[in-house]
Amino acid sequence: MATFLEGVGSIGVACTLAALVPAAALVLVARKARLTVALWYLVGATLLTWARAGGHWQVELSGAMVPVAAALAAGAFVLAWWARKPASLAATGSGVVAGALAGWLWRPCVGRRLGDILDDVDTEAARTLGLMLVYMAGALLPAVLLAVLPHAVPATRRLLDRLLVAAVGATVGAAYAATLATGRYDDIVGELYRIATDS
């Protein structure tokens, strides 16, 4: 529970926005498959964050990987838009790809519990993967709640299903992909990390 709460506490920290904003935007775009996209985003972000911490994923965002990352981001948003059913390959693929991209690019703001998880990744792989999932569930809670909202409060479905809402998500997604394509994303994440660690 403490690990989840530390993740929730990181929502207010600037560097967490690097993973949270794309998640929320993707949920807005995925009108018919919000919850599927959000849950698979959580899984993808967890796996890549954990893999990076354990040294299993050491690919840097540079050179040829810059346009690849931008294409993955844009593709994930297009897939989310085309996902017409919750149980669809488009919904699952969109969430996994976008989440994995976020996990690859995210620089977590390390709290005590997350620091312990990252320190133990090499020696306790299964346990730390589970704990990382719990932490990420807390950090990405607003996006998951946004996806759950139409199920919990059906009256909100009409609002969230509007084309204008999806357009807002798509605009954020386009900005995200463009920032990656121009090579400015890492600078923005670095600045968010600096703001978070200086405060």
Image (cartoon, rainbow, N blue to C red):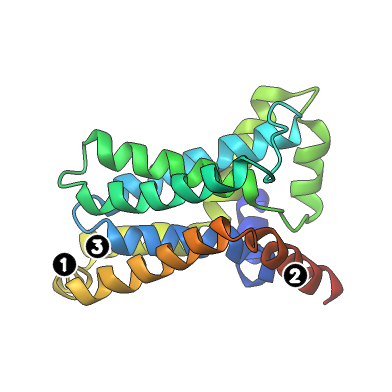
Q: Vertical placement of 123 versus 149: above or below?
A: above
The kind of residue on which mark 1 rests is Pro
Q: Which residue is mark 2?
A: 191
The earlier-in-sequence mark between 3 and 2 is: 3
The kind of residue on which mark 2 rests is Glu
Q: Secondary structure at mark 1?
A: helix
The kind of residue on which mark 3 rests is Ala
- Report whether residue 149 is seen: yes
Q: Which residue is mark 1?
A: 154
Q: Vertical placement of 9 versus 164: above or below?
A: above
Q: Residue 26's image quarter?
A: bottom left
Residue at 18% in and 72% down: 163
The earlier-in-sequence mark between 2 and 1 is: 1
The dot on residue 152 is: 3
Rendered location of residue 77, percent (x, y):
35, 53
Q: Work out how far the residue at label 3 is from the one at label 1, CA to CA, in angstroms.
A: 6 Å
